Amino acid sequence: MYEFKYHRPSTVRQAANLLIKNEDAKLIAGGHTLVPVMKQRLAAPPHIIDLSHIEGVDGIEMKGRSLVIGALAKHAAVASSPIVGEAIPALAELAGLIGDPAVRHKGTIGGSLANNDPTADYPAAVMALGAIITTNKRKLKPEEFFQGLFTTALEADEIITKVAFPVPKKAAYIKFRNQASRYALVGVFVARLPSGVRVTVTGAGSDGVFRVEEYEAALQKRFSPKALDGLTVPAEGLNSDLHGSAEYRAHLIGVLAKRAVEAANNRA
Amino acid sequence: MAVRTKRVHMAKISMIVNGNPVTGNIDPRTLLVQFLRENLRLTGTHVGCDTSQCGACVVHLDGKAVKSCTTLAVMADGHEVKTIEGLAADGAPLHPMQEAFREHHGLQCGFCTPGMIMTAVDLVHRKGHDLSDHLIREELEGNLCRCTGYQNIVASIAAGAKAMEKSDLA
């Protein structure tokens, strides 16, 4: 790890000011992405701004018809929260599938979203549920927020503060894990909202999370695994690596989408 | 020729480790596991993979299992840490989870054992004393053992969880 200067703001505003004052500064919350890449010297930020001592940004609560989760909420907190379990059980389940128990005690929803790893789980839920991401400056829709591989709309002095998830009628997330890393080889989130059905895929797309509109249209007509019979996702544009070819991932998307629809129906 | 010295921004930290207040003046790069092992000489916590996969470095931070190889010591400032050394007092009987690992031969080389035991104790805190083998195996996904094949580790944790119910040691 290269040397850095450590900063510990106690408010989001202080953290944003530190970002403005210190070029190439990086935020740290749980540190479970940043610390590993710093240890490998893949990242060498001269300044680290520690968000973990900021209070009041890790709450989980219902606000109207939305489930609002603070950016510093740990994966373990989301996974075990009765509020999440009641409102969007698929989201609690998703959080419980991230990493392992010790990782879930440190990793945060804000950190996961800001990093936008193409194999991360949360982007699939945010995109499928049409969650609104609030920062210290504005509110962003998922389509605006996610901008490709490890890329988001976040500006240099912008910090995620919370995420508001509309509560779906039905939803499920099915993840096919890489056995070594626990990241999603493919993960499919299916949500049936008052505004329509959404199907999103993580782990497979070379540009990160994406929607499968053909599946959505079919499920809109009939919310049953059978509605997806005969529909395929092209392998073009999907990741191909030592863990699985693009064709394999394309096949998995179809299989997991059906399982997700079934799981969503069984839960309701 | 003058020796070129680099200015290091040191950080003062203080925390409670195994019930005792400790302080340090550290380079912010210091990992929690380095602080525990090298500054405090608590070498029971091990570094296995150093990439947050293997769990040999698991300690409790504010009562929750974390991987100390992926935690900056400076981020634990003001918090409470418990290591394998803190489970039972020196010379006193072992913690019931340690005793269960001894009784059920839940280790061979012993390298992963401190992390296994700290993870197991955290598991009991979260899920109670009656743990199925399936649940134990799922919960051990972040702890690797290269010797035992896990069979006896699972048996040890199931027995240790039950024994903890009757023990005063948390």
Image (spheres, coloured by chain):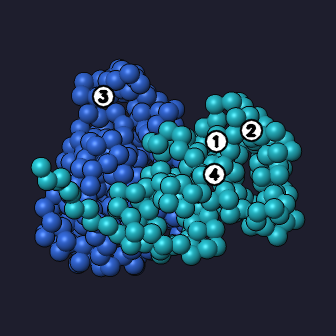
Chain colours: A blue, B cyan
Residue placed most toward the observer, B66 or B86: B86
| Mark 3 → mark 2, Cα distance in angstroms | 40 Å
What mark, if any, has residue A123 been given in the picture? none
Marks 3 & 4, CB-CB < 8 Å contact: no
Which one is closest to the eye, mark 3 or mark 4? 4
Q: Which chain carries label 3?
A: A
Q: Looking at the picture, which amino acid does disc 2 mark?
A: Leu
| Mark 3 → mark 1, Cα distance in angstroms | 34 Å
Quadrant where the C terminus of chain A is found in the figure: bottom right
Residue placed most toward the observer, A174 or A46: A46
The secondary structure type at the circle numbered 1 is: loop
Residue A94 locus on image (x, y percent): 49, 51
Q: Mark 2 points at which residue?
A: B107
| Mark 4 → mark 1, Cα distance in angstroms | 10 Å
Marks 1 & 2, CB-CB < 8 Å contact: yes
Q: Looking at the picture, which amino acid does disc 3 mark?
A: Asn
